[in-house]
Image (cartoon, grey):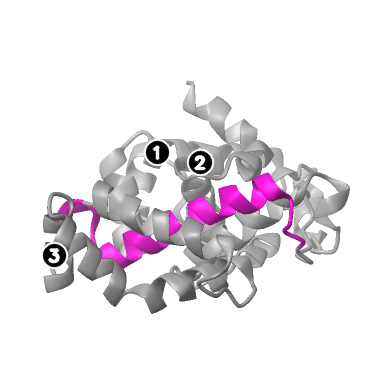
Amino acid sequence: MSELDILAEKAKTDETIMSDLILKYENFILKCASSTAHNYISKSDDEYAVALHAFSVAIKNYSINKGSFLNFAELVIRRRLIDYIRSKSRYASEISINPSIFNSEIDEEESSSISIKVTEKISKETDNSVNLEIELANEVLSTYGFSFFDLADCSPKARKTKKSCAKAVAFILKNPILVSNMKVKKTLPLNLIEKNTKIPRKLLERHRKYIIAAVEIISGDYPYLAEYIRYIREELKK
């Protein structure tokens, strides 16, 4: 717990402290806005006004148990700006992805020889909202040591393997403490998953990145990406 975290907690009920924090962290707010918009943002831009308001919202909704205030504030700013950019339809991305990263299904015999290529433009499948979610998810997954596009090489291809991965993801999601620990420690509880689901450890290790990504996407704010892994949500209903 840092001094800033304590101040942010106090600022919820003290407007003077809140004003001081906003003034002190103007550059931080501008940096977050520019990073999300992929453009230089100045104080005269609408995006700055949205980010500034989001920062104050972050203060009002912050509590010590949410971890670092700056991390929390950055998340709130990014989400508010993404919603704003979506509403204005002014975002154009060049990210490419093949939907089969999440939704592939082939015969077991063929799975070892299939290589999924990330080449298909998202614009052919859906709108720019997916691109925004990919960028946000990519930042989250980078904290685990891999990128969103690494999923092309570790996604389950065979029906049986997909079912096992879905079972592992469902087990984690049904245990909020495991979700929280995974996000804090940046690791999968392989022993617990293996013990409770009887899924072979080698399979879990081989598809570790995919399982982590699925947990993050389903438990996070990624409605478009979540559509690509609907079969996992079916597992959750069991």
The quadrant holding residue 144 is bottom left
Mark 3 vs mark 1: in front: 3
Asked if residue 8 is among those painted magenta in the image, a careful observer would answer no
Residue drawn at (70%, 56%), measured in percent from left and top? Answer: 131
Instruction: Residue under label 1, please give it.
Output: 173
Mark 2 vs mark 3: in front: 3
Q: Which mark is residue 218?
A: 2
Residue drawn at (25%, 48%), measured in percent from left and top? Answer: 60
Instruction: Residue under label 3, please give it.
Output: 7
- The one of 87 and 45 positioned closer to us in this rendering: 45
- The one of 218 and 155 positioned closer to us in this rendering: 218
- Please tell me how crowded label 3 is: few (under 14), some (14-19), or many (20+) other residues with Cα within 10 Å: some
* Side (left or right) of 69 relative to 228: left
Mark 2 vs mark 1: in front: 2
Q: What is the distance, in whole Å, between disc 3 and disc 1 at their CAs? A: 33 Å
- Marks 3/1 in contact by CB < 8 Å: the verdict is no
N-term-proximal mark, 2 vs 1 = 1
Residue drawn at (49%, 56%), measured in percent from left and top? Answer: 50
Residue drawn at (85%, 58%), measured in percent from left and top? Answer: 121
* Side (left or right) of 171 relative to 126: left
Highlighted range, magenta: 63-92
Element class at badge 2: helix
The kind of residue tagged 2 is Ile
